Amino acid sequence: MDNQINLFKKNISGNLTVIEGGSTTPENNPTLLKCFKTELKEIGFKSVPELFSGFNTIKAITFSYNIGFIDSIMKNFNYGEIILGADFLVCKDNKYNEFLSEVFTNIHEAGKAVSSHKKLAEMVSEGSLFFCTPVFILDHRKIYLLKSDNGSTRVITTSANMTGRAWNGDQMEFYEYDDSPYCYEEYSKDFETAWKNSEELPMSVISSKKADDLVEGNAVLKKIKETGHTIVLQQPEDIVSFDNIKYTIDHEKIKEEYKVLLNGINTKDKHGMAEIVPKTIEKIQHNQKKLAQKKVTINNVTEKYPVLSFDFANKEAFLNGKILDLDPEDDKIKQDIEEMLSMFSNFSQFVGDTRKLQETHFKLINAMFSSPFNAKLRCTAKIRGIGTSSLPLFLLAVSETANCGKTFIISAALKMITGKNLPVINKADCKKEDVRIIQAGCKGIPVFIDEMDNKYLANIKDIIKNPERCEENQIEEQPMLLFASNNVTDPDETIRKRMVLLRFNSSLPSSIDQNAYKGMGNAVIKRLGTAFYREYLKRMLDIVSNELDYIIHDKNIPDSYYPDLMAPSSDTIMAIISGYGYSVPGYMHHLSWNHDYSVNAGFIAEDAINEIKQLYQQNKKSFILCKETVTIELGPDRDSENKCKVRKNILPPEMKVQIIHSRDCKKIVMDRTELEARLGFKLTKNSIFSRR
């Protein structure tokens, strides 16, 4: 793509000229050819990026093509229209059939197209790139019409098709360009005529591997349903033509994928072909629904996941593009408050420190509710050089046991935000690349990925360590990613300072019927509406808008300033509850980023200190006291090793925590003075168990 191309820059110096030829007798009437009279202005050398850069839109006609080259070219533009000169109804056009196989067939090949040609897939799915092909003729022209928002234009006329070899110097080609408006205007007229005489290709569903509805999510099947034509799933080598053929794809590559979908369907057998006729579509849709119930993948989520966006100037919020009513009915708000309070009250039945469990769940809901504003504030703060670590894009909820309510509370909060029962994504269905797709494709609404483990965390570590991509690319609606785990060792500081870490230590008692309890929880989630959150958004939009104005306009922002949404968000939640006549429970209180969420949040170290205090009271002999240090001996097992890692990660640096590995046990060493200061008492020396 960086090869220098020998260019002939031309300009139109006169009006349209008709070249006459042949006899004018009726027996031999001449053919009039439309000609563009040009004259050579200069010869120069440009690379392909130089030739195509500086413009926003492209309209092109090409006879042959390469998907990879089209993808690379489209990175320069935000809108395009391309005419593929070969008539796609001709079955022997193998290039176009391969194109259909690679791009149209989202059940198999389009997955590869999406992963390797992201720009192409993105533009097609967003409706900013369209393809047509002539219906009645073959168009051999190679024309590229470029235009920018400021009115500048360029017309490239060349022998080069839209293939890499035609533009990298491997083939003998000529390249001419003309930047005059007159040239662009005249060629545009011809392009519009060609477009009107072409048939648009149905590529609106290229973006998903598998859609919720197979027919609506697959260009081939959708076209069959609309037109009544037959799909041919296999093409024998000796095939020449069949009148009923509309699309031909490689059946061998995808027959396994279709096997489940064609279950119970008797396909016709004609000349060795397996056909799906229009009347089978309903059965395919039925089978697709059965298949969808078996497994929910990340592709379903990114395809249908709701979008929350804001108009800060007018203090408006939109869900899936539809404006939200930010003046919900009082009765609806009260109903949500009652359900939310009862939801928190249920935690009183748990085993352990239930008050702390409720406080941590309140922190979780508060972080989720405010998260749709984080990306916008991050992007705005970045421009002013203000730190953004207080506006997290990741949250990790960890516990040592299951059944502590993490998944329940997250599902309930998502229901209050969207009004939908959003699916829980399992880490097995969400690979590293899927995480990147979520970040780029989902907007506003937090996305929940469950059952994270240490291996998964290590695999996506580089993604978490680089949240700055949001503000560098000004992705103002990037969602918060929520992770939950029952076995992740607390991550090191480099990860923790870029995410919210919440630890849950209580769990559901074994005496409770867990199935019945889960059923009651699902019933609560079902009753939850969006009224409370819409009232919350109305109040928070004022707060966030003022914060944005302060960041943008204030000339005297102190160096110590950073945006803290956790504080006004928690205050807003409590204000709504009290404002509608309910008592604010004690586990709900004013929160702040520094004290409740940051990597050095006081409560995190306090939890670890309390655990050490309990261990000292229960088993003093595990403490080895020296003049300057305290060594705590734990077991040799993996659990003890994890506890050592957790304490090293979350205890403050002043305590100088170190881990010592031995054959018989795991040891953690720390500064004695710092530990005693945080415990609030002196550790007792014992000549039997203490050493110097």
Image (cartoon, rainbow, N blue to C red):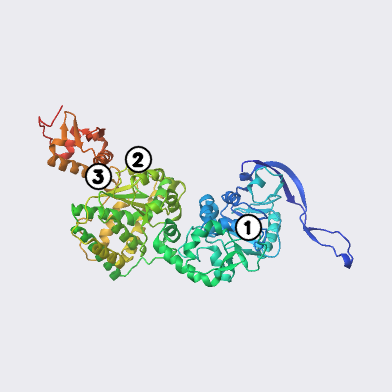
User: According to the image, label 2 marks what residue?
Assistant: 494
- CB under 8 Å between discs 1 and 3: no
Q: Is residue 184 visible?
A: yes
Q: Please tell me whether mark 1 or mark 3 is closer to you in this view.
A: 1
For this orientation, the residue located farthest to the left is: 687
Callout 2: SS = helix
Q: Please tell me whether mark 1 or mark 2 is closer to you in this view.
A: 1
User: According to the image, label 3 marks what residue?
Assistant: 604
Q: Residues within 10 Å of mark 2 (few under 14, many from 20)?
A: few
Q: Amino acid at mark 1?
A: Tyr
Check residue 96 in the rendering and tell me which mark sits there, or answer none. 1
* Quadrant including the C terminus: top left
> Which label's residue is closer to the chain start, 1 or 3?
1
Check residue 9 in the rendering and tell me which mark sits there, or answer none. none
Percent position of residue 556, x then y: 37, 44
- Is the residue 248 above or below the residue 603 in the image? below
* Quadrant including the N terminus: top right
Percent position of residue 397, x then y: 30, 50
Q: Residues within 10 Å of mark 1 (few under 14, many from 20)?
A: many
Q: Residues within 10 Å of mark 3 (few under 14, many from 20)?
A: many
Q: Amino acid at mark 2?
A: Thr
Find the distance from the CA under tag 1 to the CA under tag 3.
60 Å
Nearest the viewer among 213 and 591 is 213
